[in-house]
Amino acid sequence: MAYGWVTLAIVVLVSLDKLPNLGAMKQAEERAQQGQVKPDGAQDIDFSGEAPQTTSPTMG
């Protein structure tokens, strides 16, 4: 049960900038502050279209 409370405390401390970002999140934050919101080489995902119809005998 202590793990949940520790995790919650870490989330609060990071969101209040009391605990610094580490690792990949630090790099992502720096990149976002410079105006680049997605990493180099990331693929665009088109959310505007409808999902393709799939048929499955088990899912109806």
Image: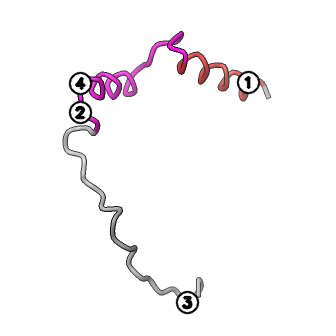
Element type where label 3 sits in the image:
loop
What amino acid is at disc 1? Trp
Relative side of 17 to 39, left or right: right
Residue under the image location 44 percent in, 82 percent down: 54
Q: Give the range drawn in magenta.
A: 16-37
Label 3 crowd bin: few (<14), some (14–19), many (20+), radius 10 Å: few
Q: Where is residue 43 in the image (x, y as percent from the top left)?
A: 24, 52
Q: Comparing marks 3 and 1, which lies closer to the viewer?
A: 1
Circles 4 and 2 in contact, beta carbons < 8 Å: yes
| Quadrant in the rendering for residue 6 | top right
Rendered-image quadrant of the C terminus: bottom right
Q: Distance between the residues labelled 2 and 1?
A: 34 Å
Looking at the image, which is closer to me, 34 or 28? 34
Label 4 crowd bin: few (<14), some (14–19), many (20+), radius 10 Å: few
Circles 1 and 4 in contact, beta carbons < 8 Å: no
Circles 3 and 1 in contact, beta carbons < 8 Å: no
What amino acid is at disc 2? Gln
Which residue matches tag 4?
A: 34
Which residue matches tag 2?
A: 36
Residue under the image location 33 percent in, 28 percent down: 28
Q: Distance between the residues labelled 3 and 2?
A: 43 Å
Q: Distance between the residues labelled 4 and 3?
A: 49 Å
Relative side of 54 to 13, left or right: left
Which residue matches tag 3?
A: 57
Q: Is residue 50 above or below residue 4?
A: below
Element type where label 4 sits in the image:
loop
